[in-house]
Every structure is written in structure tokens, then in C-alpha cells.
Image: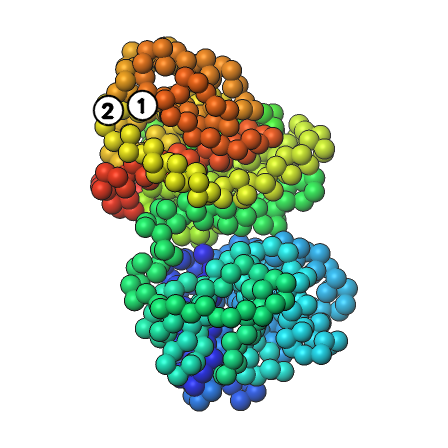
Amino acid sequence: MCGIVGYLGEKNTKEILLSGLKELEYRGYDSAGIAVLQDDNFESYKAVGKLVNLEEKTKNFVTKDFAIGIGHTRWATHGKPTELNAHPHVGSESYVVHNGIIENYAELKRELIADGVTFLSQTDTEVIVHLFEKNLKTAASAFDAFTKTISQLKGAYATLLVTKSEAKTIFFAKNGSPMLVGIDNENEKYFASSDTPLIGHCSDVNYFEDGDYGYVTPTEIAIFDMQGKKKETQFQKLSTNKLSAQKDGFRFFMEKEIYEQSHVIADTLLGRLHESEILFDELDPTLFDGINEIKLCACGTSYHSALTATYLFERYAKIKTSIEVASEFRYRSPIMTKDTLFVVISQSGETADTLETLKMAKAAGLKTLVICNVDNSSMVRLADACILTRAGVEKGVASTKAFATQVTVFWMLSLYVAKLTQALKTEEIATQIALLREVPASVIVQDSMHERIKRLSKRYLHGHGFFFIGRDVFFPLALEGALKLKEISYLHAEGYPSGEMKHGPIALADPELFTIALLPENLLYEKSKSNVEELSARDSTICAISPLEFDKADDFIQTKHHDNYMLEFFEMMLVVQLLSLEISVRLGNDVDMPRNLAKSVTVE
């Protein structure tokens, strides 16, 4: 995901910014840039692709003596990865970098355009610098203008701003996205969005809290809370372990990525939700002309998200939908008709079997669409259309946030198609969109829930296997929960539709068979409960995941009451991910690098 660095001091500003950005490469990015203010002059450089391209552009740029500078690595969330969309973004005499989402950027942008402002990029970030410069015209000081600007922003952000009118000052604000400031032995100031860029430069750091904003100068660090009250700095010693710093205090990258899901889903939704319709700027509506069927093709976790999509497309868009395992589809001489939209799903866009099925569909003359996380990947280049999931880099081999963002995209796409086919009324689509807006909040990990799962995990380290069971969309979630457990704990686990238990699998039921039962309140609860009771009667050990307490359960993980089954889906997704994580941790496994597995499967 995007990364921020900043520096105020007399050392080599360019090199400090570039080395800081290099330490943020692990977060993933598709463009990068820096802006330096020295001797009342700005120098700014941007480049698409790897940092080596930015380093090449800046090789003749020299900084010495006092300067202030800001830098950024960008993972495209709104607007293509281009130099114009790369940060820092410029006004007439100011530059800004920003992580997060400005939820009201469209409204602010319209107002600024009406005032005569010309925008260069497609990003939400650019409104910050233009809004600041508008406020600067009437404010008593640059800090007053910055304070007013922050008060007008809605959403999540970590931002740094520099302006010629205050040539020895960096303004900052933090709300929802991480950021910290550090000092060295000469009391010079460093900013970053995580610890790693500051290791080796700073001795002490101050972690900003949500709502903090202020400024730094050569002699002062001024921090204010969201009520405008000045705060004391709270410096602490900086860790010297860079790998630990990359994990942002989490034990494993997988754990960090589970916790990130709220933010990345918000990125997935960014710019795509209107009051009563879904907006996919990357899609031409004619893609669906003449289409009578959608065929989905994927592997592994992506297959499970696609299986979820089959329920959503048929329920909301009223269009025939089928799903294929890519490694099977490519070898079975399938019948492909041109009234079918062929959709492939892959986190990396390089999954070998899935890529080959895409080539088959293209050769057969089918329209094609890819749901992917990596722009410019092989599938993205080959397909007729692409929707990026915006999940950021996922370092844990066992996928978590990729699955979450894929399902989010499919939910939106089912509503997009429903509007085209008039399968849902406008008010019904509006209701679904209101639910989509609640998803980021539904996947915030609560400490109490995580602690509950940690305590329970010690009871699930033995036995002869696990059943994960659910109905409807909770069946693919059961498959995904079982896969997560298999991948990182090496315990045998299977996902089943709840109603299939009596057709054979129930023969395995005994106290050493653990059943993880997904029991949503808003979808087929009584039928699912009945299936679990059948297992309980055969003495299977039951762990129920539900907002409703279940008296036949040996263990119970309570989820929140939601108004819709899809919000329950996302919260239960968190639970099965965390349960697999904690079981694996107790077994002493390497959670991020499970045996025999690779992150991107580029061979058959």
C-alpha cells in the first residue's frame, strides 16, 4: 500500500527521501515521487514503476544544506498508475502527499473547479493541496489554512504538506492511516508511515493518534488533537529490527493483513459507490451486450470468492452463472458460446492455469474480464476489461485480504449488472449500496474477539479433522475457512454445504471431529442449525460462529447482529481467518511461509 516519508534538516535530503521510500517497497507500489523545497525553490520528480526509475530521474539533482522534502510510493486506488497520478501533488506553490481516502473529494473537487481550479490528476489527494491554497488566501497564517483544510476533509488520511509561504515548515495530519515523526541526535525531523524508513536515522519516535495534526520546524514539533488542544510529544525509543518494523507490531504478515482488511476494502469501494448505482469507470457497459451467461474461472482462494459470486449474480443480476476450476477447465474440451462473459479471478494475474483458460476464451471469441490485484499483469494485459481489487501487496502466503476484496468487487459487480439488466429496482440497489458502505466497519478486528479466539484455539490442536459447514454464500466461506486452516496448520479440514452432512460425511462424526459451524442470523438459520444438531447428536465437537447463542455448541464465538447476511459473511470471514492463525501459532508453525506452498502459482 502507499507509503509516506518526509525530512526537515541539513543532511542530503534527496538521499534520505529515496532511502526511506526504498524501505517502504515491501508495501507494494506502482509509482513514486519526491518534492524538495530548498532556497525558496521546489524541485519535484515522479516516476512510474520501480524506484530505480525515480533514482535515474533524480541522479543529477543535488541537495545540500537546509531543505525540507516529502516523498511517496503509490499503489493505485483511484486513477491509473501514471506520473500525473503519482504523488506529490502540486498546487501553485505547495505540494502534498497522502495515504488513505478522502471520502468527500468529489464534492470538494466540484467546488474547487467552480472556483477556477484546474486539476491534473484523477486522484482524491489533489483536492487537499488546492483546498489548502484556497484557504490560504483568507487565512491569517499557513497553519490556520492547513487547520481549516483538515477540518473540511472526511475519511481516512495521513498527509504531509509543504508550501513556499512557510519554507521551513512541514505540516502534517493523521486520521485513520498510520504516521509517525522521529528525531535524530541533531534534533532534525523525519516523517514516515511506518517505522522502517526511520531505522538508522532516528533514535526516538512519536506515533500520532487519530485526529492529530500540526507542524514541525527546525526548532519545534507542534501537535494538536482533534479539538485543537496542543499536546505534548510522547517520544519512545525506535526499534532497530527492520523486519519487525515492516510488520507494524504484528507477529506475522498474515495477522497484519487480516487487520488491514478494513482499510483495503475501503480502497476497493473508493469512487465506485454512488447513491443508487455502482460506478466502474474501467468498464464499458457494452461489455455486457448480448451476454446471457457469466462463466467464472479461478483456482484456490480465488475460486472460493468466485463461488460466492455465483450466488450474488443469480440472486441480484438474475443472470445464469457457472464456475469452473481452472486446472480442470483447460483440459476438458469445454463448450464455449459467444453469449458468455468469461471472467477470470487471480490475486497476482499470473496464475498459470487461470491464465491459460483466459487464452482459451479469447481464442473462442468470448468477451473477457479479469478481477485482479496487480495492474499490468499478464491477465490484465490480455483480457478485454479489468477491475482491480486494490488490496495492496499480500506477503503472507495464505491469502486473506485478497479474498475479502475479491468478494467486495463481486458484490458491486452483481449490482452493476443488475442495473444494466433492470433486475433490481433503483431503491433496491440503493439499499445494497448502503450495506456495502458498512463493510469496512464490519471487518475491524475487535480485541475482545481476537482474545476469545486465542483462548479457544488451544482446544483444537488434535483430533482427526475439521468440518467447516455453511449454507448459500457461507458454503464457499466454509471452503475458504477449511483451506486457511489446512494451509498454515497442516491439520485436515474440509468445507461442506451444511445440508450435505447426512449424505455421507456425518459418518465421521465423533468427539475428535471438530465442526466449525457458520450460523448467520439472516440466512437459512433454522435449516443450518438443524444440520448442526444432527452432528451434535453424533457427539461431534461443535464450535458455532453466530450472533445467536446455540445451546448445542461446545464452543461459541459470538458475532455482531447485522441487518444483512453479507455483513455477517464478512465478520465470519474474520473469525475463520483468526482461528486458523491462532491454531497455527500454537502449533509453532511459520504462519507466513507454510511448507510446500508459494504465493503466486505460475506453473501447472
Residue 460 numbered mark, or none: none
Q: Residue at x 73, y 59 (%)?
A: 110
Tell me the CA gap for discs 2 and 1: 7 Å
Element type at marker 2? loop
Q: Residue at x 28, y 15 (%)?
A: 510
Question: Left of 136 or right of it: where is 242?
Answer: left
Residue 463 numbered mark, or none: 2
Q: Residue at x 36, y 14 (%)?
A: 535
Going from the N terminus, do you reach mark 2 or mark 1 first? 2
- Name which residue type carries label 2: Gly
341 to 375, vertically: above or below = above
Question: Left of 31 or right of it: where is 428?
Answer: right
Element type at marker 1? strand
Q: Position of residue 534 (x, y in %)?
A: 39, 11
Q: Position of residue 15 (x, y in %)?
A: 39, 78
Q: Residue at x 48, y 60 (%)?
A: 178
Q: Quadrant of the C terminus?
A: top left
Q: Quadrant of residue 162?
A: bottom right
Q: Position of residue 357 (x, y in %)?
A: 39, 36
Q: Which residue is mark 1?
A: 514
Q: Nearer the viewer, residue 493 or 463?
A: 463
- Name which residue type carries label 1: Phe
